[in-house]
Image (cartoon, rainbow, N blue to C red):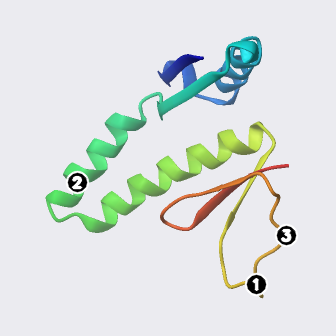
C-alpha cells in the first residue's frame, strides 16, 4: 500500500486531475490510498469568502462561494462527471451507482 497526496496545482483543473488518474492507475498494484486536498487557489478563495462573511458582507461571500462551486462543476464536466442537486425522490433523475454526496446535498456521479 502507498499513500498518494495531491493538492493545489496538481489538482487545479480537469487536465491536471486526468494526469493524476494516470499516475494512480500506474500504481494500482501497490494499492494506492489517494488523498486530495483543494484545487489550486481554492483554499485562498475559501478564506476570502470566510473573511468577507465575517465582515458582514453575506451576499458578497455567497457570490464568492458560487464562483468556487461553478469552477468545480465546470472541471468535473470536462472529465465527464455529471452533477446534480439532490431533490425529492420524485424529482431526482437517475443517479449512477458511482456517486459521492456532499454534506450539503450535492452529488457528483461518474458517467
Disc 1 designates what residue? 91
Distance in Å between CA atoms under marks 1 and 3: 10 Å
In depth, the one of 107 and 52 nearer the eye is: 107
Q: Nearer the viewer, mark 1 or mark 2?
A: 1
Q: Is residue 15 left or right of residue 70?
A: right
The quarter of the image holding the N terminus is top right
Residue highlighted by disc 2: 52
Q: Is residue 3 above or below residue 101?
A: above
Q: Quadrant of residue 31?
A: top right
Q: Marks 2 and 3, how far apart in space?
A: 37 Å
Q: Are marks 1 and 3 in contact (CB under 8 Å)?
A: no
Residue at (36%, 36%) from the top-left corner?
43
> Which residue in the protein does label 3 denote?
94
Q: Residue furthest left?
A: 55
Q: Secondary structure at mark 3?
A: loop
Q: Is residue 46 left or right of residue 68?
A: left
- Sequence-wise first label, 1 or 2: 2
- Contact (Cβ within 8 Å) of mark 2 with mark 3: no
- Residue name at image x 66 percent, y 26 percent: 17
User: Residue 6, percent across and down?
Assistant: 51, 22
Please provide percent x and percent y for residue 14. Answer: 68, 30
Q: Secondary structure at mark 1?
A: loop
Amino acid at each position: 500500500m502507498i499513500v498518494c497526496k495531491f493538492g493545489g496545482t496538481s489538482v487545479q483543473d480537469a487536465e491536471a486531475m486526468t494526469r493524476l488518474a494516470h499516475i494512480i492507475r500506474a500504481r494500482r498494484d501497490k494499492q494506492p490510498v489517494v488523498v486530495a486536498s483543494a484545487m489550486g487557489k481554492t483554499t485562498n478563495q475559501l478564506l476570502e469568502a470566510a473573511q468577507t462573511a465575517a465582515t458582514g458582507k453575506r451576499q458578497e461571500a455567497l457570490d464568492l462561494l458560487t464562483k468556487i462551486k461553478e469552477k468545480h462543476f465546470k472541471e468535473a464536466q470536462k472529465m465527464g462527471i455529471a452533477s446534480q442537486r439532490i431533490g425529492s425522490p420524485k424529482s431526482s433523475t437517475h443517479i449512477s451507482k458511482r456517486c459521492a454526496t456532499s454534506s450539503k446535498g450535492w452529488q457528483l456521479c461518474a458517467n
